[in-house]
Image: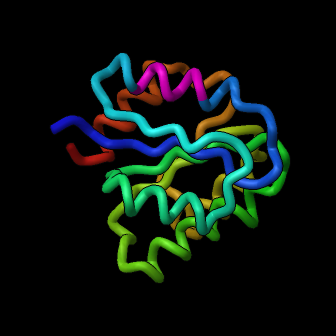
Amino acid sequence: MPRRILIAKPGLDGHDRGAKVIARALRDAGCEVIYSGLFQTPEQIVETALQEDVGGIGLSLLSGSHMTLFPRVVELLRERDAADIVVFGGGIVPQDDIVALKAKGLAEIFTPGASLGDIVRWVEAHIPE
């Protein structure tokens, strides 16, 4: 069974090119990818992840609200006894925020310039099939 990954755009960020590029790269690598579309709440993202039985959630955000929305997804997964779902993120995230986000339960944060190959290899190494 292939890895199942949810790619989601939390909040009011309307820029989805990066999320679509990641979704395609993961699909090309053999993952089953669900793209939830724009303007999702953390609650919607977690509900979709549970319904779709994913092993990982990739969050993409460029609006600057990553310190609120990313940890909220992790918190909601814990509340729903689904903390085993690996959450990673991407976007314009300052280095200090990356450290703080990892402390709050995000597994990894990718910033502009991360290669698709590196992201795919990370997913293959950290998200179960």
Magenta-highlighted residues: 20-26
Classify the position of the C terminus by image quarter: top left
Magenta-colored stretch includes residue 75 = no
Image point 67% across, 34% down: which residue?
Answer: 111
Classify the position of the N terminus by image quarter: top left
The vertical placement of 74 against 53, above or below, is: below
Q: Nearer the viewer, residue 6 or 102?
A: 6
Farthest-out residue, left:
1
Q: How far across and how far down the image is residue 75, in percent? A: 55, 75
Q: Nearer the viewer, residue 29 or 52?
A: 52
Q: How far across and how far down the image is residue 14, in percent? A: 80, 37
Image point 48% across, 55% down: which residue?
Answer: 87
Q: How far across and how far down the image is residue 122, in percent? A: 39, 36
Q: Nearer the viewer, residue 76 or 47?
A: 47
Q: Nearer the viewer, residue 117 or 51?
A: 51
Horizontal side, residue 95 vs residue 33: left or right: right
Q: How far across and how far down the image is residue 67, in percent? A: 74, 62
Q: Main secondary structure of the magenta part?
A: helix
